[in-house]
Image (spheres, grey):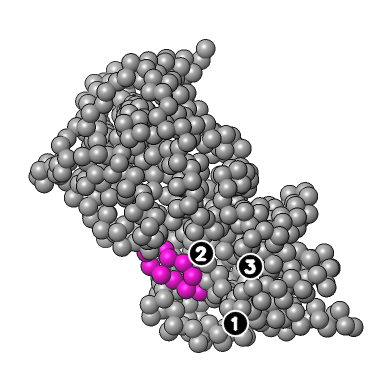
């Protein structure tokens, strides 16, 4: 067994055993804690407080009150006494991510909401981020980096006398720091699981989410082909295995996962969030997500429309016909996006199906009389009309 | 170093290495297979985002940018990808206006790491160099939160794409340059560069 794989396997087994024993994590500080301003931690918080002021006013925030209140209520349920110490900001970004700042600022990307199947999976990520905060991971990491860098300078002074090369010890601190980071991620995974179970959610949601993330990423080979030495996070597969073992110790608390609540909250924003995702051109991942959304019952007409968009934009062999089929299906379903008429009309135009294209352009304008591209559509309606009558 | 001549020579040598903006003087200017009539000077950026792109600015690239793109062949992208993990969309000669809008919006979004939400609107026909072209409006916030608006002029001529993208801060810069950009769009002519592609 190669050293890296053996190391990962042993770590996974140890952490799994820790979870099975019911390791009881506790916060590092009391609710409403603030560090002394003159301390290193006070300085870090001061800088992040300034960053939070920018985030608070950022145009990249999704400001929908209902959605923000929903996330804040979930964080409160998970954080318990630390509810008032954490602020959540939803950021319009289609990538899968969430992050926690040392002062209690949590950022959640819209790309995370597009990937979780139910409330329990969302709670698994929020719990993980809350765990980073409660265990003061950022300041510990900063101190670890500072101390190891200082030691490395002294070791290098000694080493240079024997080897003539300066910097060997400092170079090794990079790998050590990243390894420290991965250890913190694993701790946050397990502490997050504890918070998840304590809030009545099914802890099995955490490994389920990472199974899905691993499946999605496997479709795009470029995103996780990396050297484990330089990775800041464990791989999705590693996390899934660790969490699966640890979750078994808790049993099921709420098997339904509250998928309906999440879907109802997300449905009004689904179109905007998915449009942003399509622009990333991660077509294989988009296809995976659309399959999931279809199964979860997101607005059918919109899921069919985005399936059409995926095929139209990807342009692989057979995608033209698949796009036409998907748009046509969207137009048979309740409340299709008006854009489905327009995109289907353009495809019919390419196929030289002038009467169909004309009719679809007309239906687009009827469904969307305020369309800002009306002048372009009028141009095609007029030229197709002339062409048909000649 | 005590020799002042040597210090001066060293400074000149270092200054010569630094990338610098060059003046694009008013008048008729040819760039990337397009001939444009400029009423005011621009500054050509040394950091072109692609081999078929000339990037100009008046007041700094955050405040206003003019991308002059031309002689773009089938299979080529508007911009170089900022990451080896991100493939830029490419041009094909059979693209209709809706697809060229997607090409532009996605290329700009990916140029900025996929983090920005770029929106397009007001797609409408426009005669370009005596042929059928079109134009549309752009809008996006920068990563730091500055709101920018823009206008795009495009025409696929044969197997090649010609495009001018103007983007500027909505506050002051966009409205103050709009009349100049309108004139620039109206007078743009396609004058393909020989030997390209």
Q: In the rendering, at what x and y percent does residue B43 appear?
A: 47, 73
**Left or right side of B111 for A306:** right
Q: Nearer the viewer, mark 2 or mark 1?
A: 2
Mark 1, residue position: B185
Q: Residue at x 50, y 28 (%)?
A: A237
Disc 1 element: helix
Which residue carries the number 3 mark?
A338
Mark 3–mark 1 distance (CA, rounded to whole Å) = 31 Å
Query: Is A25 on the left or on the right of A317, as rendered?
Result: left
Inspect this view and state whether residue B167 appears: no
Q: Residue B67 carries which label?
A: none
Is residue B151 found inside the magenta-colored segment of the image? no
- The Cα atoms of the two marked residues, 2 and 1, are separated by 21 Å
Judge by depth and name the residue closer to the eye, A126 or B40: A126
In the rendered view, would you say B23 is above or below B9?
below
Quick one: SS at disc 3? loop
Quick one: label 2 or label 1, which is nearer the N terminus? 2
Give the mark toward the camera: 3 or 1. Answer: 3
Q: In x, y percent, where is residue B171? A: 38, 77
The residue under label 2 is B118
> Percent position (x, y) of residue B52?
62, 64
Taking the spot 56% from the left edge, 51% from the top edge, the residue there is A298
Identify which residue is drawn at 41% across, 73% down. Answer: B169
Q: Is residue A346 above or below residue A259?
A: below
**Residue A390, quarter of the rendered image:** bottom right
């Amino acid at each position: 067994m190669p050293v890296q794989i053996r190391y990962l396997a042993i770590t996974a087994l140890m952490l799994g055993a820790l979870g099975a024993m019911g390791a009881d994590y506790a916060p590092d500080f009391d609710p409403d804690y603030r560090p002394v301003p003159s301390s290193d931690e006070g300085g870090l918080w001061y800088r992040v407080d300034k960053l939070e002021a920018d985030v608070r006013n950022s145009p990249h925030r999704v400001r929908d009150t209902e959605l923000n209140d929903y996330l804040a209520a979930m964080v409160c349920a998970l954080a318990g006494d630390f509810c008032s110490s954490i602020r959540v900001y939803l950021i319009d970004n289609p990538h899968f991510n969430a992050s926690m700042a040392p002062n209690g600022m949590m950022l959640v990307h819209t790309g995370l909401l597009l990937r979780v199947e139910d409330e329990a999976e969302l709670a698994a990520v929020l719990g993980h981020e809350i765990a980073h905060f409660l265990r003061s991971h950022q300041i510990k990491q900063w101190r670890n980096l500072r101390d190891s860098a200082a030691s490395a300078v002294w070791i290098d002074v000694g080493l240079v006398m024997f080897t003539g090369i300066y910097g060997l010890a400092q170079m090794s601190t990079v790998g050590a720091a990243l390894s420290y980071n991965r250890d913190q991620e694993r701790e946050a995974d397990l502490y997050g699981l504890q918070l998840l179970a304590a809030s009545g959610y099914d802890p099995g949601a955490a490994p389920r989410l990472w199974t899905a993330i691993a499946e999605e990423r496997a479709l795009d080979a470029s995103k996780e082909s990396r050297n484990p030495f330089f990775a800041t996070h464990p791989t999705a597969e590693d996390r899934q295995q660790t969490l699966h073992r640890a979750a078994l110790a808790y049993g099921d608390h709420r098997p339904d996962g509250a998928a309906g609540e999440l879907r109802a909250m997300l449905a009004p924003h689904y179109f905007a969030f998915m449009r942003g995702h399509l622009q990333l051109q991660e077509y294989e991942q988009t296809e995976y997500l659309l399959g999931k959304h279809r199964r979860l019952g997101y607005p059918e007409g919109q899921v069919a429309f985005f399936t059409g968009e995926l095929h139209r934009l990807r342009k692989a062999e057979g995608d033209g016909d698949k796009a036409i089929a998907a748009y046509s299906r969207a137009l048979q379903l309740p409340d299709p996006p008006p854009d489905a008429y327009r995109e289907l009309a353009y495809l019919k135009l390419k196929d030289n199906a002038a009467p169909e294209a004309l009719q679809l352009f007309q239906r687009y304008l009827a469904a969307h009389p305020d369309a800002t591209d009306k002048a372009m559509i009028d141009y095609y309606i007029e030229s197709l009309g002339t062409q048909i009558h000649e | 170093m005590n020799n002042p001549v040597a210090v001066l020579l060293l400074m000149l040598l270092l200054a010569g290495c630094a990338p610098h903006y060059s003046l694009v003087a008013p008048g008729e200017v040819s760039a990337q297979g397009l001939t444009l009539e400029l009423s005011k000077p621009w500054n050509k950026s040394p950091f072109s985002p692609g081999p078929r792109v000339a990037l100009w600015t008046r007041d700094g690239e955050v405040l206003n940018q003019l991308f002059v793109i031309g002689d773009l062949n089938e299979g080529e992208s508007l911009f170089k990808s900022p990451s080896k993990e991100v493939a830029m969309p490419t041009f094909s000669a059979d693209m209709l206006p809706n697809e060229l809008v997607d090409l532009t919006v996605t290329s700009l979004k990916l140029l900025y790491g996929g983090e920005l939400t770029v929106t397009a609107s007001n797609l409408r026909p426009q005669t370009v160099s005596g042929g059928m072209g079109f134009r549309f409006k752009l809008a996006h916030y920068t990563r730091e939160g500055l709101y920018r608006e823009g206008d795009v002029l495009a025409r696929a001529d044969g197997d090649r794409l010609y495009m001018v993208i103007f983007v500027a801060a909505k506050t002051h810069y966009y409205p103050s340059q709009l009349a100049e950009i309108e004139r620039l769009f109206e007078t743009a002519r396609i004058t393909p560069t020989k030997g390209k592609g």
